[in-house]
């Protein structure tokens, strides 16, 4: 009888349901927030757009441009905007990184040749003749890892050869809140 008690306990424990700690993070509504990791001379934001899809089209000159439409994915958009140079016309400068993620954001890693599976593109928007536009990212490593039930971490290092770039790394933890009373739905935590 003594030998049956541990066996019975073991059977009961193995039948107990466990919480799925590997569940994906789902973004239910559009989110826009400032990041903490940004060059001093600018502002950076992350935008998540659920229920969308991303496509890059070419205009009549062969230049790429993003087309966001309704779909079943979540678009990740990172924007760096340099502060305008005082007393200088046309000093506006922005860099944008786009990625198309699954609706349920799960742990994944994309490197070099697989970066286009996530439609990773870099945009440089400025008054820079011949050095502006959108370009597919072909060299780098984009990693999504789960931090908790409602957060994920983005680690992205990349290089563009077509144009100069300021942003070459994005390292942010994104926390998706479900509390409707909070002022924002997304918090960014510093990754040191």
Image: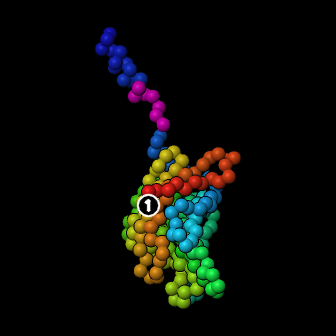
Residue 186 falls inside the magenta stretch: no
Viewer can see residue 138: no
Viewer can see residue 183: yes
Residue 147 relative to residue 182: left or right? left
Residue 82 relative to residue 11: left or right? right
Which of the 4 image quadrants contains residue 33? bottom right
Q: Nearer the viewer, residue 91 or 106?
A: 91
Which percent across, then down, holds residue 115? 43, 67
Which of the 4 image quadrants contains residue 159? bottom left
Determine the residue positioned at 46% across, 56% down: 191
- The residue at which mark 1 appears reads as 155
Determine the residue positioned at 52% across, 66% down: 38
Which of the 4 image quadrants contains residue 143? bottom left
Q: Nearer the viewer, residue 41 or 100?
A: 41
Is 146 located above or below residue 67 in the figure? above
Q: Nearer the viewer, residue 38 or 17?
A: 38
Q: Nearer the viewer, residue 101 or 159?
A: 159
Extreme residue in the top direction: 1
Extreme residue in the left direction: 3
Determine the residue positioned at 53% across, 78% down: 124
Extreme residue in the right direction: 181
Is 116 located above or below residue 7 in the figure? below
Determine the residue positioned at 63% across, 81% down: 86
**Start and end of the magenta stretch?**
13-19
Which percent across, then down, holds residue 72? 58, 59
């Amino acid at each position: 009888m003594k030998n049956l008690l541990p066996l019975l306990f073991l059977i009961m424990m193995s039948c107990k349901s466990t919480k799925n700690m590997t569940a994906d993070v789902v973004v239910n509504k559009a989110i826009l927030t400032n990041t903490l990791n940004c060059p001093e001379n600018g502002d950076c934001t992350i935008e998540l757009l659920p229920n969308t899809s991303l496509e890059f089209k070419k205009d009549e000159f062969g230049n790429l441009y993003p087309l966001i439409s309704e779909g079943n994915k979540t678009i990740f958009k990172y924007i760096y905007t340099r502060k305008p140079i005082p007393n200088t016309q046309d000093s506006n400068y922005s860099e944008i990184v786009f990625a198309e993620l699954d609706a349920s954001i799960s742990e994944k890693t994309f490197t070099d040749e697989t970066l286009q599976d996530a439609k990773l593109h870099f945009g440089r928007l400025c008054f820079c003749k011949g050095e502006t536009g959108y370009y597919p990212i072909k060299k780098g490593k984009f990693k999504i890892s789960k931090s908790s039930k409602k957060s994920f971490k983005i680690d992205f290092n990349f290089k563009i050869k077509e144009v100069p770039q300021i942003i070459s790394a994005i390292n942010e933890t994104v926390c998706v809140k479900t509390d409707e009373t909070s002022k924002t739905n997304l918090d960014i935590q510093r990754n040191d």
